[in-house]
Amino acid sequence: MKEISFEDFYKLCQTGCSTIIDVREVAVFHQVHIESAQNLPLNSLADTYEVLDKNQTYYIICKSGIRSAQGCQFLVEKGYDVVNVASGMDAFE
């Protein structure tokens, strides 16, 4: 699985990273999130992933990097190009 440090991810976002998927629950996402992130909670990802474009690279983020890794594994199995954001929002906050 591809992975990026939060520091490198943050630098990348400064140039306009618009393909961020946040897999935290809706209530937690609304408390604090990256402005351009799309919220697709991990527990419903199996029902919502088809809205994603297989021609895009997606950066998957959660609180600490564990659920985003699970989301990445699922999406890779479905044929998507994804990158796990290590340390997740813990590094952002």
Image (cartoon, rainbow, N blue to C red):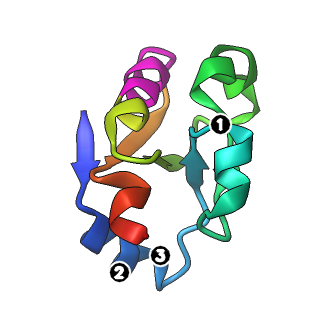
Is 39 contained in the magenta span? no
Tag shown at residue 11: 2
Label 2 to label 1, Cα distance in Å? 25 Å
Q: Position of residue 25 (x, y in %)?
A: 65, 37
Residue at horizontal 34%, vertical 44%? Answer: 84
Label 3 to label 1, Cα distance in Å? 22 Å
Q: Position of residue 7 (x, y in %)?
A: 27, 73
Residue at horizontal 23%, vertical 61%? Answer: 5
Residue position marked by numbered label 1 in the rendering: 25
Residue at horizontal 43%, vertical 38%? Answer: 81
Give amino acid for label 2. Answer: Lys
Say whether marks 3 and 1 touch (CB < 8 Å).
Answer: no
Give amino acid for label 3. Answer: Cys
Quick one: 24 or 36, which is closer to the camera?
24
Say whether marks 2 and 1 touch (CB < 8 Å).
Answer: no
Closer to the chain start, of discs 3 and 1, is 3
Give amino acid for label 1. Answer: Glu
